[in-house]
Image (tube, helix red, strand yellow):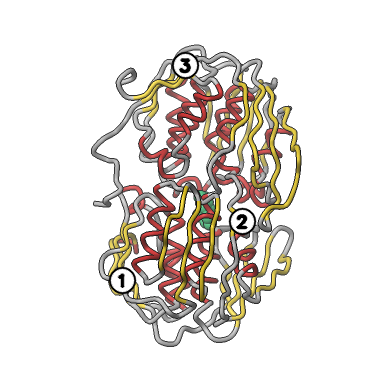
């Protein structure tokens, strides 16, 4: 079992109806950008300085994996890190198992990295990660010549990969819009001669393309169909170090943001949030629901657009969320379901099949949480329909299934529910948002942990 697993020590917590939330907050650095800054830094020749790195467990596991593969990774201060890279193709054979804990992104991207080097590495993680599908990564990597030496049933973790001496560049049409699949193939493609291309019918987050370009690789991005993209990378570049400033994570900002919308009288500013258009589906949806959300002080920092987001408590109405918006808000559906519960009317979220393979089966986990809180909903195929009535009874206990976003979403719900809401385990919040509790309490949220709620 993973050294970072929390399975043995669940920490319950209870959220109570709170007075108006007020104040300014800066949530931690973006998780996707943080993983990539360490991994890409490890593939440059020279020193990359990173500021604002998310120091959550998922990212720290990626840092350890980079070190195990030969890079020098050093923490200089809060959020300040330096990575001394070994260059594309320069990784060394790791001695032990690479343990990614709860992290899908770290493990899947690193599979692409290992593929591009003639080394053998074993990947493992906690019980949640061991359940998640890895075939979607192994399939394209095998086409490129990678050998799956060993894997658990269905190609799951723990698994061992062997990178070939000569990797074959491919053109891969991804069956799902997944930045992790796209990134794994492109990272492998760094080690292949010629051009590696990934086609996606729906565009997924583009941090890999942006950062590869930032580090000097040649990447071309063309539109593909109505919503898709074709991304082509020229293999075997020499990546050059460049400083990275990690913007605040919009997926973490979503929690104080929805909390401020549903707790009457709230007025909160969330500072420096990344507003990359491939990540802002939640903000668009909430605005359609009538949310008072204003982007202030919009600017570009480290190649990404950011803004201070001012949010005031709002009366929300139910909306229809189109399936093609899913990639730009894939991690935000649990907290959108919370907002929808406080809205008046029906919110239909279309095309959520990918939610079934996240840190938990999030469709099932959200549905169970809504039941526990007394919210009416239905599931039709891959669509979730929440019947909002403007208020939530609360009073139940929610199972979080080793999933940080389920824990944070239902704690947020409890802040405005008629009765307190309990969640069974908040320990996984440390994977992505270690400062969640103190920062939410700083805004006025009443969340009692462990001793009180047990
Ligand atoms: C991520 C991609 C998404 C997202 C995850 C982070 C990334 O996963 O859910 O939290 O950093 O590439 P998929 O690629 O499975 O959609």
Identify the secondary structure beneath mark 2: loop
Q: Which residue is mark 2?
A: 205
Q: Quadrant of residue 177?
A: bottom right
Distance between the alpha carbons at the discs numbered 3 and 1 = 47 Å
| Badge 1 density bin: few <14, some 14–19, many ≥20, Cα 10 Å | some
Give how far across and how far down residue 296 sits, in percent: 75, 37
Q: In the rendered view, would you say 25 is above or below 28?
A: above
Residue lying at 62% horizontally and 66% vertically, measured from the top left: 209
Q: Quadrant of residue 157?
A: bottom left
Give how far across and how far down residue 74 sits, in percent: 42, 59
Identify the secondary structure beneath mark 1: loop
| Mark 1 or 2, nearer chain start | 1
| Badge 3 density bin: few <14, some 14–19, many ≥20, Cα 10 Å | many
Give how far across and how far down residue 301 sits, in percent: 68, 53
Looking at the rendered image, the disc whose residue lies closer to the viewer, 1 or 2, is: 1
Front residue (pair 396, 195): 195
Q: Could you say which disc has been placed on residue 94 in the image?
A: 1
| Mark 3 or 1, nearer chain start | 3
Q: Could you say which disc has been placed on residue 16 in the image?
A: 3
Front residue (pair 135, 287): 287
Front residue (pair 444, 399): 444
Q: Quadrant of residue 424?
A: top left
Does the closest atom of ligand 1 sit within 8 Å of the Cβ of label 2?
Answer: yes
Distance between the alpha carbons at the discs numbered 2 and 3 = 35 Å
Front residue (pair 361, 280): 280
Distance between the alpha carbons at the discs numbered 1 and 2 = 29 Å
Looking at the rendered image, the disc whose residue lies closer to the viewer, 3 or 1, is: 1
| Mark 2 or 3, nearer chain start | 3
Residue lying at 40% horizontally and 53% vertically, measured from the top left: 60
């Amino acid at each position: 079992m993973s050294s970072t697993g929390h399975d043995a020590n669940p920490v319950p917590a209870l959220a109570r109806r709170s007075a108006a939330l007020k104040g300014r907050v800066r949530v931690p650095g973006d998780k996707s950008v943080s993983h990539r800054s360490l991994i890409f830094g490890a593939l440059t020749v020279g020193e990359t300085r990173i500021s604002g790195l998310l120091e959550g467990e998922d990212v720290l596991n990626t840092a350890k994996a980079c070190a195990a593969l030969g890079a020098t990774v050093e923490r200089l201060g809060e959020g300040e890190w330096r990575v001394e890279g070994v260059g594309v193709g320069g990784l060394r054979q790791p001695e032990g198992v690479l343990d990614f804990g709860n992290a899908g992104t770290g493990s899947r991207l690193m599979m692409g990295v290992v593929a591009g080097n003639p080394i053998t590495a074993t990947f493992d993680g906690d019980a949640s990660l061991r359940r998640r599908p890895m075939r979607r990564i192994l399939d394209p990597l095998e086409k490129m010549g990678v050998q799956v030496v060993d894997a658990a049933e269905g190609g799951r973790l723990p698994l061992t990969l062997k990178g070939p001496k000569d990797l074959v560049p491919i053109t891969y049409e991804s069956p799902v819009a997944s930045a992790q699949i796209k990134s794994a193939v492109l990272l492998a493609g760094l080690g292949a001669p010629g051009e590696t291309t990934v086609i996606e019918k729906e565009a997924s987050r583009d941090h890999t393309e942006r950062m590869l370009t930032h580090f000097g690789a040649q990447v071309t991005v063309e539109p593909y169909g109505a919503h898709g993209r074709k991304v082509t990378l020229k293999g075997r570049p020499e990546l050059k170090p460049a400083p990275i400033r990690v913007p605040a994570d919009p997926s973490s900002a979503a929690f104080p943001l929805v909390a401020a919308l549903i707790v009457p009288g709230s007025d909160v500013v969330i500072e420096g949030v990344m507003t990359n258009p491939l990540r802002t589906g939640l903000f668009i949806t909430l605005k359609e629901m009538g949310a008072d959300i204003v982007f202030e002080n919009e600017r570009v920092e480290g190649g990404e657009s950011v803004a201070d987001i001012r949010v005031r408590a709002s009366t929300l109405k139910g909306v229809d969320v189109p399936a093609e918006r899913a990639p730009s808000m894939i991690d935000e559906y649990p907290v959108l379901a919370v907002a929808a519960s406080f809205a008046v009317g029906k919110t239909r979220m279309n095309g959520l099949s990918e939610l079934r393979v996240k840190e938990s089966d999030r469709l099932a986990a959200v549905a169970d949480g809504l039941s526990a809180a007394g919210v009416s909903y239905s599931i039709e195929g891959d669509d979730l329909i929440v019947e909002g009535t403007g208020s939530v009874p609360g009073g139940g206990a929610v199972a979080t299934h080793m999933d940080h976003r389920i824990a944070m979403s239902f704690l947020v719900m409890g802040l405005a529910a008629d009765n307190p809401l309990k969640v069974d385990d908040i320990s996984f919040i440390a994977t992505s948002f270690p400062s969640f509790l103190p920062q939410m309490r700083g805004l006025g949220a009443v969340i009692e942990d462990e001793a009180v709620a047990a």
